[in-house]
Image (cartoon, rainbow, N blue to C red):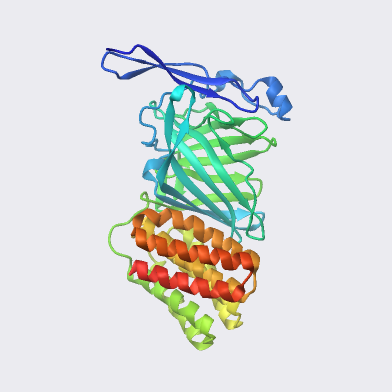
Amino acid sequence: MSRTSTLVVALVVAVGLAGALLAYTTRDSSGSPTASPVAIPQPTADQLEAAYLGKLPVAPESERVDIVAPTFSNPTAITNPLFPISDLHSAVLNGTVDGKPFHTETTLLPDTRIFEWTEGQQVETLVSQYVAYLDGRIEEVALDYYAQADDGSVWYFGEDVFNYDEKGAVADTEGTWHAGKEGPPALIMPASPQVGDVHRPENIPGLVFEEVAVKTIGKTVDGPRGAIQGALVSEELHQDGTYSDKIFAPGYGEFYSAHGGDVEALALAVPTDALGGPVPAELETLSVSADATFEAVRAGNWNAASAGVGKLDAAWTGYRSGQVPPRIAAEMTSAITSLDKAVTARSEVRAGTAAIDVAQSGLELQLRHRPQAEIDRARFELWARQLLVDATARDLGGIRGDLATLEWIRDRFAVTIDKVDLTRIDTQLVGLRGAVNDGDLRGIASRAERLRATLAAVSA
């Protein structure tokens, strides 16, 4: 028996912010859906005023392209070239915030999340993990939820946000919202954006609010491997009345963001920037020499550490003569310079951290040749090393941040290793968490070494 008309979506907006998001789907005799567009109720002027947003220069609804509710038949196949989450396994961005080095890692996680809508309807979303580091320490983690509509547009179903303080603890979860609970999902990338298009990636006054206007399409920008054609330039209005400039590039998604004096730009993404063949010999030498230098510093063998810096510098000189993503090249050069100075000064803490920074930049370059999960396992081990350094420095804030970073990175590779091995790693993390909670510096160092040994056995 054929079905005629079914209510597909009715999203009730909580906390009195907006009405309901309705999308109806009719089905033909074969059961295939055909969409009947329904308007998405928008925040009223009174609601904007209540959220102190009444004076924002928002665009008229006639310019908006996110007013009609879409349908989602295959929502986890996100292939929009300007926001290709399904095909973007890992991305690294860097820049400066508040005059300090800023670094982010965005990783597509293997799990999905289903958002429950009224009338028993559900939408499955992909989960993207965003981790931001400010001046080498964890600052923010967000789990972002995306789905692609049938027309090719990409919609944002919310995020879980964890903001960390200087003590390495979660200070707040400001910015968290979920479609179906606090408000409607929001358009983050139109299917075929045009100059003048306006949409809101977040649209819940009083909680989260942003409005984006497309300024340029088809722009050519410089990327990790050269010129990239077809980029989109937009201007983003924030709820505090300030603006950001943003660029999205095909194969990369969000590519550049500038707000005030802060800048965040894409340094590398895979598989877009992936290269065939094994890891080049110079990169292997960089990795081995960074490891050896770290161990020499830990042992107080400064002659060996100085020799390690010399090997690093020679290997880097050889490797950077080829095509190297410029933003990562700058990070690597800076890290080697810092390491050289710290070794000369015989500063165990500074030299240990600098050796880890060199290894981190090397892993980002190896990301072009190795699977993302392998790189994340190696990153995991480097953060266990940072725990040792911070334990030596008696820096409990740093230690707490290191542990939080380990716990988040663990989620990136957990499904790629044997369950017994994962249990061993999780057991070590639980023990480490206990030592950190107790402020037991000796126990922290011991647990960190055991975690490194466990991971080495898993990777062997």
Query: Of 307 and 130, which appears nearest the observer?
Result: 130
Residue sitting at x 57%, y 74%: 443
Frontmost residue, 302 versus 107? 107
Left or right relative to 101: residue 287:
left
Query: Residue 182's quadrant in the figure?
Result: top right
Q: Is residue 177 left or right of residue 254?
A: right
Residue 298 in the image: above or below residue 258: below
Q: Is residue 445 above or below residue 56?
A: below
Residue at x-position 50% and y-position 19%: 22
Residue 395 sits above or below residue 222 on the image:
below
Q: Position of residue 421 (x, y in %)?
A: 37, 63
User: What is the x, y in percent for residue 381?
Assistant: 45, 67
At which x and y percent is residue 159? Answer: 54, 40
Quadrant of the frame with the C terminus: bottom left
* Residue at 57%, 65% in the rendered image: 434
- Which residue occupies 43% across, 29% down? 122
Q: Position of residue 370 (x, y in %)?
A: 34, 60
